[in-house]
Image (cartoon, helix red, strand yellow):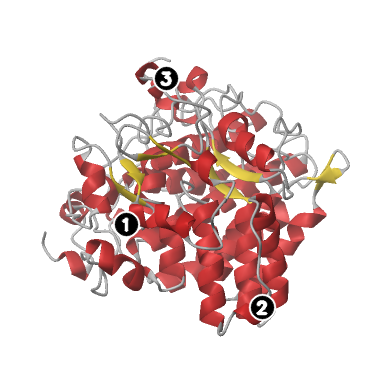
Amino acid sequence: MKTAMKQITYIIGAFCMALSLTGCTDFLNEEPVSEIPADQMWKTARDAKAGVNEIYGLLRTTLRENYFYWGEFRSDNVSAGAPVMADQARVINNLMSTDERCARWTSLYQTINQANLAIKYVPRISMPEVASRNDYLGQAYALRALCYFYAIRVWGDVPLFTEPTENYSEAIYKERTDRNRIIEQLILPDLKQAEALIDRTKNLERKRISICGVWAIMADVYMWMQEYNLADQTIDKMATISSGGKRFVDFEPSIQTWKTMFTEELNNKPSDDTPESDEYATKELIFLIHFNMDEVGTNGYSYMYQWFSGSGNRAAVLSDKFMSLFDEADMKNDLRKDYTVKNYQNGNELRKYMAGDISNSLNKTCTVAYPVYRYSDMLLLQAEARARLGKWEEALDLVKKVRDRAGLNTPTSIAFGSEDELIDYILRERQVELAGEGRRWFDLLRTGRWKQVMQPINGMSQEGNELFPIHYSHLLENPKLIQNPYYGNK
């Protein structure tokens, strides 16, 4: 494009130092919004599509590493891998300081800003089908909610932006907003907006937010808020959505299907050119972070192989604590074990996403998607909700589905002496079933078990240690920010 043309520059102040958003994922082979002149963008259906696609591309950039840093590495699932992977080891060993790259929120706020742009401009676009415009807008609301949900779980209170930053001003420097206020005033309202707007018949993709994706985030938020009845009701709604005469999301009872879901279904899927067509055979998957090297080159490969295979560059291995779960009396002969882990090159490698041994040449061509939400996750969340509601047998009926698939027996409610015992049982099932899916640390946070679980492992005991530090550069950029107290001036 001519240099005289004015380019849109998205400035996320207070933490981004006048960032310019460049490039797009080409998620639907559309022209990147950030390369469209300001006087021409957000005018057509094509612009709306490209603008929403950019949110997904930025989310992929955000979670490419942080999926593991934020949701997995602080938990008892993993131990440090190769010595050269020092960044990951500091997080795993609870030795973080304020210069950790996973403590930066720059790309997360870029994603939020792109969502804010879509929320502002998409309603102004005249499109042939109102349902399509509403669907794009619904996805933007849901993705903004998801980003803020990550933010409050990682840092606690964070700056709140509900309008896009399009030009520099002092307004970009904001104080942190209370996390509970963000849930009540943005996350839940955004999800309810998305629920009303998303197209329930033509949006049948798992690489984008569908109506079931909205409900998955919503149920997760309700569980965080201890609104167990609302979480239970929200998960039930997923059974109402169908595709081709079958439920869009459903439980897969076969352990073989469980295996191929991770080793084949997540790998090397094409771009989302036809959202009305579902190219996944399994119904378990709800929302994924999609990787495709044909779209964005080396930025399109994931770290699922590189960080979990090979003794030289393994970021993490499965911990002795995690492995000990398979030695418990009611967990022996768990069919998931051999599909989840392999003792290889002096470490228990996470093999859930690998069909065999992975060579160094394959490490950097990996296009395995990251499952953000899948249906077994929802069933076990629902089991926890029902246990909290006193419906113990109903809770165990849901757990039994997952354990039957794993070849294990499930006790009746009489085996449990207290609600806490039953919750711990369900959480253990979640830990094994969802290993490597970025969920365990958030489960420990949500249920208040992070101290009792992690103190014997890495010394976590002080209140505030559960939060990540705010990167020092954000504090330098924005004098209104205050560091999370645990980290002081480190």
**Numbered marks: total:** 3
Q: CA distance from mark 2 to mark 1?
A: 55 Å
> Of the residues under marks 3 and 2, which one precedes in the sequence?
3
Q: Is residue 5 visible?
A: no
Q: Amino acid at mark 2?
A: Ser
Image side of residue 273 versus residue 458, left or right: right
Find disc 2 in the rendering and name its residue.
Answer: 413
Give above or below for 264 relative to 15: above
> Of the residues under marks 3 and 1, which one precedes in the sequence?
1
* Image location (x, y in percent) of residue 191: 61, 59
Q: Nearer the viewer, residue 114 or 81?
A: 81
Q: Seen from this angle, which residue lies furthest left?
A: 489
**Front of the two marks 3 and 1:** 3
Find disc 1 in the rendering and name its residue.
Answer: 171
Give above or below for 166 relative to 388: above
Give above or below for 450 relative to 127: below
Q: Quadrant of residue 305?
A: top left
Give above or below for 269 relative to 226: above
Q: Nearer the viewer, residue 351 or 122?
A: 351
Q: CA distance from mark 3 to mark 1?
A: 46 Å
**Front of the two marks 2 and 1:** 2
Residue beneath the point at 62% across and 32% down = 265
Q: Is residue 426 visible?
A: yes
Q: Amino acid at mark 3?
A: Leu
* Image location (x, y in percent) of residue 421: 52, 78
* Image location (x, y in percent) of residue 212: 69, 51
> Which secondary structure lies at badge 2?
helix
Q: CA distance from mark 3 to mark 2?
A: 47 Å
Find disc 3 in the rendering and name its residue.
Answer: 362
Residue beneath the point at 71% across and 52% down = 197
